[in-house]
Amino acid sequence: MAWFKRKKNEDRKALSEQKIIEIIERVEETAASAYPSDTAAQKETVKKTTAPGPRPSKNGLVGRLRMGLSKTREFLTTDIDELFSSHKRMEDLLEELEERLITSDIGVQTATRLIENLSKKSSRISDANQLKAALKAEIISLFNGHSAFPAKALQKPHIVMVVGVNGVGKTTTIGKLAAKAAAQKKKVLIAAADTFRAAAVEQLTIWAERAGAEIVRHRENADPAAVAYDSVEAAVARGKDIVFVDTAGRLHTKVNLMEELKKIKRAMSKKIPDAPHEVLLVLDATTGQNALSQAKLFNESLGITGIALTKLDGTAKGGIVVSICSTLNVPLKYIGVGEKLEDLQEFDPAQFADALF
């Protein structure tokens, strides 16, 4: 228990920006191998991801989500059953449950809040199933309080700037979003503004071809802001509906990444004053609480309007979804539960809670 109290105190301390940057760099280095440098390998990956097949049913989507959350669901439900079988006092039981929620990546503040709310209902909880139902209700309530989307009319072209560190699946997410938009008969343009990683441009080009979208690209190591500006200008001239702007996740220069991203935003606003209309942050669920730290840094610098959480496919602890929705005043828009196109789903709080228990 001493470890648990020490862990709570440590997690409550805010990470310095330098610490967060160090975390980002470690994530990048770990994930670097995820990007094939060989174009043929990239084509095969995209081919598998966008392979045609029957349209998934709602049950199919729920099934994949349940599979993606299997690790967390087994962890939570088994632990709750074991806690009740130990016949401990409710106060002690809830304290142990709080510790286990934290280790499932729900986070200290969110876990404490959930347990405090459960404590108020403890007199009405007499078995494991009732505790699970009460916890599920609290998680849904938390989602409903933090995941509301403001009503907003889409402009044409609608500019979506996509950010995130290397290795989180940013380029693949852009490809999937472009393919989905094209399937809805929207005219799509992709801006290859990550000019520092050649593989990103090649991968985006493959996605653009498959989605029937146009792509604006410059030479390697060109000014990313210039690519973004040219892309917005081209989208206006060609009557495009939506533009997805890829960006660097790490610079091989001494230029600060956040300052470079701010420069891209300013360049686009010169053509369309309120562009970008969305700033979508892509996070890797397998990095746990480090993903939350990244989100805080990007949000402070760029004003994130939405989050896409990738790789929630069984290797991650699903509690990070609860933590993100609870901690940040930024909506979670998409979750990725697999490699295929249909595995990038719009986030549904109730569906997620159902799959968690």
Image (tube, rainbow, N blue to C red):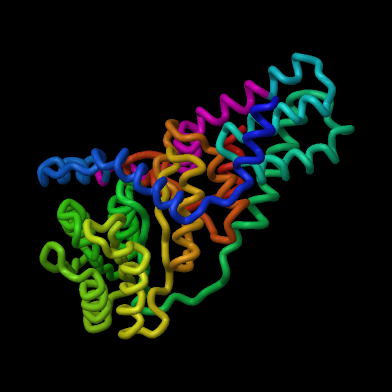
Residue 84 percent coordinates (x, y): 76, 19
In the rendered view, would you say 116 is above or below 241? above
Question: Could you tell me which residue is drawn at 67 percent across and 50 percent down?
Answer: 142
Looking at the image, the residue that sits furthest to the right is: 123
| 6 sits to left or right of 336 | right
Residue 174 seen anywhere in this rendered image of the structure: yes
The front one of 212 and 18 is 18
Residue 2 percent coordinates (x, y): 69, 27
Residue 13 percent coordinates (x, y): 61, 48
The answer to which quarter of the image holds residue 148 is bottom right
The answer to which quarter of the image holds residue 118 is top right
Q: Which residues are magenta?
A: 50-79
Residue 320 percent coordinates (x, y): 53, 42
Question: Could you tell me which residue is drawn at 45 percent across and 36 percent down?
Answer: 64
Question: Could you tell me which residue is drawn at 28 percent across and 75 percent down?
Answer: 240
Quadrant of image for the N terminus: top right
Quadrant of image for the C terminus: top right
| 243 sits to left or right of 14 | left
Question: Could you tell me which residue is drawn at 30 percent across and 50 percent down?
Answer: 166
Residue 179 seen anywhere in this rendered image of the structure: no
In the rendered view, would you say 176 is above or below 189? above
Looking at the image, the residue that sits furthest to the top is: 86
Q: Is residue 228 on the magenta stretch? A: no
Look at the magenta stretch and give its main secondary structure: helix
Q: Is residue 70 on the magenta stretch? A: yes
The answer to which quarter of the image holds residue 261 is bottom left
| 14 sits to left or right of 115 | left
Q: How many numbered discs?
A: 0
